[in-house]
Amino acid sequence: MIKVGIVDTTFARVDMGSIAESVIKEELPSAKVIRYTVPGIKDIPVAAKKLLVEYGCDGVITLGWVGKSLTDKLSYVVASMALQLVQLETLKHIIDVTVHEDEAEEEELKRIAVDRAAKHARNLIVLLTKGGEGLRRYAGMGLRQGRPDVGPIQ
Amino acid sequence: MIKVGIVDTTFARVDMGSIAESVIKEELPSAKVIRYTVPGIKDIPVAAKKLLVEYGCDGVITLGWVGKSLTDKLSYVVASMALQLVQLETLKHIIDVTVHEDEAEEEELKRIAVDRAAKHARNLIVLLTKGGEGLRRYAGMGLRQGRPDVGPIQ
Amino acid sequence: MIKVGIVDTTFARVDMGSIAESVIKEELPSAKVIRYTVPGIKDIPVAAKKLLVEYGCDGVITLGWVGKSLTDKLSYVVASMALQLVQLETLKHIIDVTVHEDEAEEEELKRIAVDRAAKHARNLIVLLTKGGEGLRRYAGMGLRQGRPDVGPIQ
Amino acid sequence: MIKVGIVDTTFARVDMGSIAESVIKEELPSAKVIRYTVPGIKDIPVAAKKLLVEYGCDGVITLGWVGKSLTDKLSYVVASMALQLVQLETLKHIIDVTVHEDEAEEEELKRIAVDRAAKHARNLIVLLTKGGEGLRRYAGMGLRQGRPDVGPIQ
Amino acid sequence: MIKVGIVDTTFARVDMGSIAESVIKEELPSAKVIRYTVPGIKDIPVAAKKLLVEYGCDGVITLGWVGKSLTDKLSYVVASMALQLVQLETLKHIIDVTVHEDEAEEEELKRIAVDRAAKHARNLIVLLTKGGEGLRRYAGMGLRQGRPDVGPIQ
């Protein structure tokens, strides 16, 4: 049985964790989902590592929300770098999903968050069930999460 | 008995360490609080690690104050990244609270500092006593520390 | 037999992985090529490490595509830093190829991607077969990948 | 006997190492001081680690000088991050003092350097002799090094 | 016998590796020099580590060339940070020399590269033969590499 971890935050303005959970259960009904909620993005990496190491998850999706200020962007770098370290140490995938408040206005931001969380939850399931071959046919195809795919350059 | 570490600085212009200590004692009277004061934010991470490793704390809240210059912002990145490393190595939460002088004018900055330190001290207690489930019901709810909550996007 | 890993992404808008694969097979027909496709650049490092550690590759070429926003640039830093960590831990070369959307317009971007992937695939084969001596005669010669060589300053 | 390491650079335009040494000998006459001079800030971290690991120092003060360009700022980040790593690995304090050429004009820059080196040398001695309690009464008091203290927000 | 490693790149527009090699042989004729050429700056750190760990070098000088774009600057941070990690792990000095295309026009850039490579090769030899004491008399003296020394602030 595949165990999938989900980390989300109370800072986020869209409940992306529940969206990811629905998609995972739809894509892989046999999966066990374990959730972990933290205050903000800088609290995500240790939670992700706990899910992989203490809870035995096979992969994790993290759902961060990043404010508009320079400080927020810097915190994003810090959190994402730490998520890299967790992946390298555990040799497991963490899909590091983030929505940034400077991407769009409120209403569109919500659409972005929903679409991105859902598509990346699917990506994670493909990686966990089919490995590095699973996404091969889409390599270089200009897929996007949060927005429509742009396709390959013709 | 839960041991909680607090790291604060002499650079800060608000005594956030004492605020955090009060909240922790109020929220969890049985907790033992251990404090560590350092000059500035770049001195925080090793202090936080000492509290976790040498003093046996179960979690730490750090209270940094960040100046307005680019150098200050870069120092913030450095300190926050190091706090990530401590969390990943110890598998314990460190709530990395910072107040940035470019956030607001003096008077409001003080209100921000007080509110942020208090709310994040509560967050830490929830994580330490209830784990990744404790904040679940607030996931995606747009909570803010230092400012009023903004709520989820409708 | 030399094993070469290729990591590419579904975010990219040019199928650089296949270009790299062709060049490798042309340059070193005896090489075994193993491919791994991930969603975006932040997913590359753990895949690269898997190729080196789990699949026994001797070297890896990664083919990232970086958007125009500040967030994209920051993600680039994060991914590239993680690729450094993998190299240092495994003591093997990873050629970290990236194409950035702010480099040129679409049409030229495709030419850049093709040229860069091909030339760097050759670079990797030289490093893997001839070590640190193989590129010695080009030291300081102003070689470029993705664009014409600029040559040494006269 | 407490051993204190000092790392300074030939790039600096003020002999901060000697200032720090005088203060340390004044504050703690029994201390043994070991000095290490390197070309620039990026050479500091390995020297600091050598002082802690090979020379057995209990703490280190490093005295960097940072030019005005973006490259200099980036080098500052790199050096400071590495100093974090040394602290976390050794669990010892390194006071990472830097003077930045964009802080002030030449004459004032010298006053800043002298003041900052001296005050931080004192900070290090307090941390080494009194631990995390020694600076407690100044927590949140708005102390500054290189400039006059600003005090807490009233 | 002291072994000195030199890492240079094919991206560079001046053959700094050969300049460094000449200086090293002039300053320390008994030294053994081992060279390693890579495509660009992001390939330098693993080469430097190989020289220290696999080839037994006592110290390394790396000679990077950095383009003008933001991407180039970010790659510089990544490469330099990785060189810090190598130094900290091996406890050996790596003089991380870089020439940045935004420093000057072509002709002057060449003079900068030649001067910087030569002076830093000398710095490395001093560190390797005399340790942290060797540069002591120049501490705070405002030495520069690539440009004339600026001297201490009077």
Image: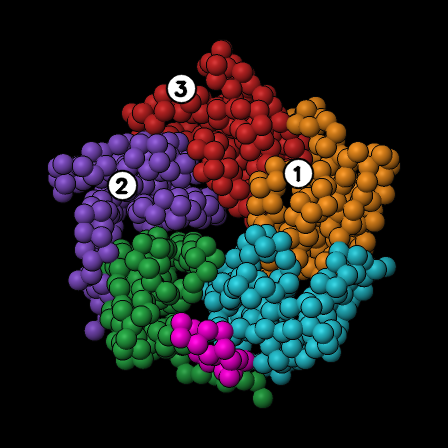
Chain colours: A orange, B cyan, C red, D green, E purple
SS class, disc 3: helix
Which chain letter goes with mark 2?
E
SS class, disc 2: loop
Q: As shown in the figure, which amino acid type bears the numbered disc 2?
A: Asp
Residue C11, percent across and down?
66, 35
Judging by the rendered image, the residue that carries numbered circle 2 is: E58
Estimate the spatial distance between the alpha carbons at disc 2 and disc 3, rounded to whole Å. 26 Å
Please report the residue visible at 33 percent of the width from the left and 35 percent of the height from the top.
E51
In this rendering, the answer to whether B84 lies above or below C32 is below
On the question of residue C143 being in view, the answer is yes
Judging by the rendered image, the residue that carries numbered circle 1 is: A93
Determine which quarter of the picture holds residue A115.
top right
E78 left or right of B126 in image: left
Judging by the rendered image, the residue that carries numbered circle 3 is: C129
Please provide the residue range marked out in magenta: D127-144
Q: As shown in the figure, which amino acid type bears the numbered disc 1?
A: His
